[in-house]
């Protein structure tokens, strides 16, 4: 996987367009002059969590003694679940209203640095740890575009409308399905190669 393909993968998983309605709901009770500042603060916290997991996650995998084959296959399954959630409608936003100003939860975690994003960053670095600088740049590039979109979430939500957001998110989900299938095939191919001869 190249730097740019990793960045695109991280961007799809971060799903800023899918998270945009949640951000709009979460910040609607904040004073208008503080909204951008709050969103940027939460995005920076999310970036810190992603980078931390990028470097610490591989040691956790070594502790659990997980093989690269298992990681590739499970990564494909995780991405498939994420993609299916993007393609099919999400639950109603009514239960996600935030009392007061949000801090860390739910904007930074889990909306941006959620389980799917953490698992993807872990998958990247654990497969080729020597390329950690490339994966760091990929995470940062994806986060930067995500931050630009979410910082203007109110504008984009008005410009695209609900149907436009849903359509774009489902398109991103379909692209992610393709990536997930390829990862599953790669994992199964590695597994078959590792089987003893004559099995």
Image (cartoon, rainbow, N blue to C red):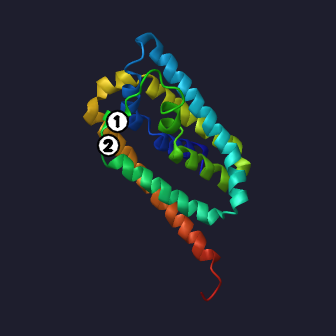
Q: Is residue 87 above or below residue 14?
A: below
Q: Is 164 on the left-hand or right-hand side of 52? A: left
Residue at image location 62% in from the left, 79% down from the top: 195
Q: Is residue 38 above or below residue 123?
A: above
Picture coordinates of residue 95 (x, y %)?
34, 35
Q: Is residue 102 visible?
A: yes
Residue at image location 44% in from the left, 35% down from the top: 16
Seen as rendered, the residue at the extreme front is 99
Residue denoted by label 2: 91
Which of the 4 image quarters holds residue 166? top left
Picture coordinates of residue 184 (x, y %)?
50, 63
Residue at image location 54% in from the left, 33% down from the top: 143
Q: Is residue 137 visible?
A: no
Q: Is 196 on the left-hand or right-hand side of 95? A: right
Q: Please rate how many residues cluster around mark 1, counting C-alpha atoms within 10 Å: few if below 14, some from 14 to 19, many from 20.
A: few
Q: Secondary structure at mark 2?
A: loop
Q: Nearer the viewer, residue 53 or 124?
A: 53
Q: Nearer the viewer, residue 35 or 138?
A: 35
Q: Nearer the viewer, mark 2 or mark 1?
A: 1
Q: Secondary structure at mark 1?
A: helix
Q: Is 187 on the left-hand or right-hand side of 99? A: right
Q: Please rate how many residues cluster around mark 2, counting C-alpha atoms within 10 Å: few if below 14, some from 14 to 19, many from 20.
A: few
Q: Is 16 on the left-hand or right-hand side of 130? A: left
Picture coordinates of residue 167 (x, y %)?
30, 40
Marks 2 and 1 in Cβ contact (< 8 Å): yes
Residue at image location 58% in from the left, 60% down from the top: 72
Residue denoted by label 1: 95
């Amino acid at each position: 996987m190249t730097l740019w393909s990793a960045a695109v993968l991280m961007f799809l998983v971060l799903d800023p367009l899918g998270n945009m309605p949640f951000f709009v709901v979460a910040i609607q009770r904040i004073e208008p002059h503080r909204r951008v500042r709050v969103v940027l603060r939460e995005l920076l916290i999310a970036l810190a969590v992603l980078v931390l997991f990028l470097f610490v996650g591989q040691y956790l995998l070594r502790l659990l003694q997980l093989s690269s084959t298992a990681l590739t296959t499970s990564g494909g399954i995780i991405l498939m679940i994420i993609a299916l959630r993007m393609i099919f409608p999400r639950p109603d936003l009514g239960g996600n209203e935030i009392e007061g100003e949000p801090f860390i939860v739910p904007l930074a975690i889990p909306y941006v640095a959620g389980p799917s994003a953490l698992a993807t960053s872990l998958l990247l670095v654990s497969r080729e740890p020597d390329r950690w600088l490339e994966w760091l740049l990929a995470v940062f590039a994806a986060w930067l575009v995500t931050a630009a979109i979410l910082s203007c979430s109110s504008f984009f939500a008005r410009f695209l409308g609900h149907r436009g957001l849903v359509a774009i998110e489902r398109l991103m989900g379909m692209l992610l399905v393709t990536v997930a299938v390829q990862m599953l095939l790669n994992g199964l191919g590695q597994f078959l190669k590792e089987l003893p001869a004559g099995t």
